Amino acid sequence: MNKVVLLLLFPVLIFNTSVREVIKAPQLVLHFLQHHQLNAEISFIDFLEMHYLGQDLDDNDDEEDMKLPFKKIDGHHIISVGVPEEKFILLKAVCLNIYTKKTFDYTNCYNNPDFGSLFRPPISIA
């Protein structure tokens, strides 16, 4: 199964612009060797400056220069954004009184006549 997925996704990977440009790396080396044969003092950094920073010599190899990697990049990408449709469900707000006990229950604070007066002398229980 993994091999099938790999075989299906491999062309997508190869035809991606950045991968296609990286595959052109041998062309860069071959073109550098051609320039190095013409001028043995040229370094690879000088070669990159010459071809990518716009200081190219008039050596009638513009067609070869344009075949170098990242010299021209095609931006033919299709960008599509998939936004799933959302279904809105309107709910009716319902208020239920779940807690019915009073917070302050003042009935527990009343005097019980069985206990007598608060202001009486202590009673010994024996």
Image (cartoon, helix red, strand yellow):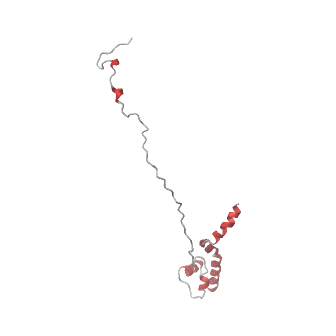
Near-viewer residue (32 or 15): 15
Q: Residue at x 48, y 53 (%)?
A: 89
- Asked whether residue 41 appears in the rendered view, the answer is no
> In the rendered image, which quarter is residue 7 located in?
bottom right
- Asked whether residue 9 appears in the rendered view, the answer is yes
Q: Residue at x 67, y 66 (%)?
A: 8
Near-viewer residue (109 or 32): 109
Q: As drawn, which residue projects farthest toward the top?
A: 126
Residue 83, position as x, y percentages in the image:
53, 62
> In the rendered image, which quarter is residue 4 located in?
bottom right
Q: Is residue 114 left or right of residue 16?
A: left
Q: As drawn, which residue projects farthest toward the left?
A: 119
Quadrant the N terminus occupies: bottom right
Q: Is residue 34 left or right of residue 117?
A: right
Q: Does 81 appear above or below 70? A: above
Q: Residue at x 34, y 27 (%)?
A: 109
Residue 98, position as x, y percentages in the image:
44, 38
Q: How many marks?
A: 0
Near-viewer residue (76 or 37): 76
Quadrant the C terminus occupies: top left
Q: Residue at x 63, y 86 (%)?
A: 38
Q: Does 120 appear above or below 30? A: above
Residue 16, position as x, y percentages in the image:
61, 71
Residue 81, position as x, y percentages in the image:
53, 65
